Amino acid sequence: MARIDRDKKAALVSVVVTAFLVVIKYSVGVLSGSIALLADAVHSFTDVISSIGVFIGLKISSRKPTESFPYGFYKAENIVSLFLALAIFYAGYEIVLTSVEKFEEVVLTNVPAAILVAVTSLVLTLLLSSYKLKVGRELNSPSLVADGKHTRADVYASAVVLLGILGNYLGFYSLDQIAGIMIAVFIFKSGYEILKDSIKVLLDASIDYDSLHKIRELASEVHGVRKIHSLKARGSGKFIFVEMEIETSLRDLERAHLVSAKIEANIKSELKNVDKVIIHIEPVEKEFIRFAVPCTENEGMRSKVSWHFGEAEYFCIFDIKAVDNELTDMRFVRNPFVALEKRKGLKVAELLVSHKIDKIVTKERIAKKSAFYVFDDAYVEFEVTDSDTLGELIEKL
């Protein structure tokens, strides 16, 4: 709730500061006869209206979902951003008009006061835009970021006003127009970017590729996820909604639910402002079951099954087809941790999990040991055997 209050506070600060600038620019504009200051005062007044709009948008978007609006009011911010983009276009148009009007020879009075107000406006506007952009980006608030960019465009407008006043004082009457038109190009560009981003969110366009790729990686790292069939993510205000369909060979409903919960936790821990992660789980029957068996040597089917899990010299990894129980893809993996004094069982378990095994068959019971928790976390099943050789064990399987 504190984060929501912070962006509302930024919007209110913007209203107060901009209203103050409207008063001093208009007052000194009348006293000095500066058309640029008067035009900038009118322009700043439109910013006051924009900042009030941002505050209203934040207020609406923070409302809790209702039966009529079950997905919340987050897009109210994007609607405000859309109108702010139009306000930026208007600001650029206004600056162009002001620049053209400045061709007329206007002799200013109270020039020091006009310059002081122009400089004050430039500094305060720069500080205000930096403040709103910082808060908006930290809170991922599209309307506040849009308002910050709008205010940053006003910095250019203030610079144009200052140049116009100085140019008028020095007799360079065309300086205002040239600078104004150049700045207007940047203002139109800023407005276009905000307009484009707002429309994309309102039309439920996908989030950026890098974030989407990050979500896919986070989901793929969770044990039990065999394949990701589809992944969609969209923005709504400052929040992100994720939908995905994953494939798993887990048949246990509780374990499948744990996989879903882990995916959601991983995504929310790595990406900011993820509101909901909706995961559809599609269970499939595996073509084969992958076994791992600790062995004392690498002698094929004659290999003896080791009595010790962590101290086994080798591990035989093989697949048995689900359809006809046919043995396929047998290989032996040397245990690189056999000489370790501590945690050898844990290291071996992590190694076997990396080979994506489904079941570990041992003579030694490993329940409640460190290796057990590694296997349990990776949804690897356990089985205890009394077979002496690998051949006997496989025949029983």
Image (spheres, rainbow, N blue to C red):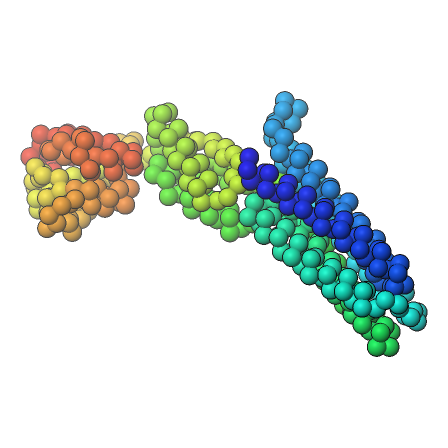
Can I make out residue 199 in this image? no
Q: Position of residue 177 (x, y in %)?
A: 83, 69
24 sits left or right of 261 in the view: right
Can I make out residue 145 in this image? yes
Q: How many marks?
A: 0
Q: Residue furthest bottom?
A: 171
Q: Residue at x 63, y 22 (%)?
A: 67
Q: Position of residue 96 (x, y in %)?
A: 83, 62
Q: Quadrant for the N terminus, please.
A: top right
Q: Position of residue 202 (x, y in %)?
A: 67, 41
Foreground of the two, 251 or 277: 277
Q: Quadrant for the C terminus, please.
A: top left
Which quadrant of the figure has residue 315?
Answer: top left
Q: Is residue 243 above or below residue 146?
A: above
Q: Residue at x 36, y 25 (%)?
A: 254
Q: Residue at x 53, y 50 (%)?
A: 209
126 sits left or right of 342 in the view: right
Q: Is residue 96 above or below residue 297?
A: below
Foreground of the two, 343 or 156: 156
Foreground of the two, 44 or 282: 44
